[in-house]
Image (spheres, helix red, strand yellow):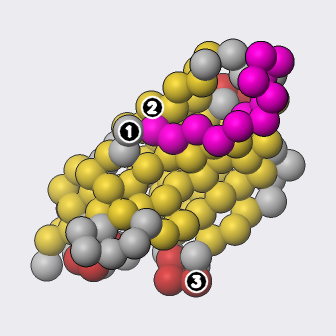
Amino acid sequence: QVHLVESGGGLVQAGGSLRLSCAASGSIFKTNAMGWYRHAPGRQRELVATITSGGSTNLADSVKGRFTISSNNAKNTVYLGMNSLKPKETAIYSCWGNMYSLQYGSREYWGQGTQVTVTS
């Protein structure tokens, strides 16, 4: 199996910054892509950013220019740098990964999520 563990969430004032990390472990033969989604109360889960093993990134329009996604393929780790945070971005941020293992083939995996709270 594959496990994703997030860290770095917390409480920050509007306009502040946070950096999230997510480390994948387990029977990983190849990481195809990793990324971040967020789920705010009363709203649907939405994609924040993804990055492929080749380094191609995709960011939601609402975070472009403020958030950056990066990864360390050797460590199966993905990072999300968040600047100029807004109160409406308060949500649970979950790590996502598409990994290939010899036992299960390509599958999607999710972390438990980390709370990000932005106060006004």
| Image-based side of 36 in relation to 99, left or right | left
Residue neighbourhood size for the residue with mark 2, other residues' Cα within 10 Å, grouped as few (<14), some (14–19), many (≥20): some
Q: Are marks 2 and 1 in contact (CB under 8 Å)?
A: yes
Where is residue 31 shown, x and y percent of the image? 76, 35
N-term-proximal mark, 1 vs 3: 3
CA distance for labels 2 and 1: 7 Å
Of residue 97 and residue 23, the one placed in the foreground of this image is: 97
For mark 1, give the secondary structure.
loop
Which residue is nearer to you in this view: 30 or 63?
30
Answer left or right for 111 relative to 51: left
Whether residue 66 appears in magenta in the rendering, the answer is no
Task: Give the left or right position of residue 73, taking residue 44 as reference.
Answer: right
The disc, 3 or 2, on the residue closer to the chain's N-terminal end is 2
Image mark for residue 61: 3
Residue on which the image places disc 1: 112
Image: magenta residue range: 99-111
Secondary structure at badge 2 equals: strand
- Distance from disc 3 to disc 2, alpha carbons, whole Å, reads 26 Å
Quadrant containing the C terminus is bottom left
The dot on residue 5 is 2
Q: Amino acid at mark 2?
A: Val
Q: Quadrant of residue 28?
A: top right
Residue shown at 51% from the left, 41% from the top: 110
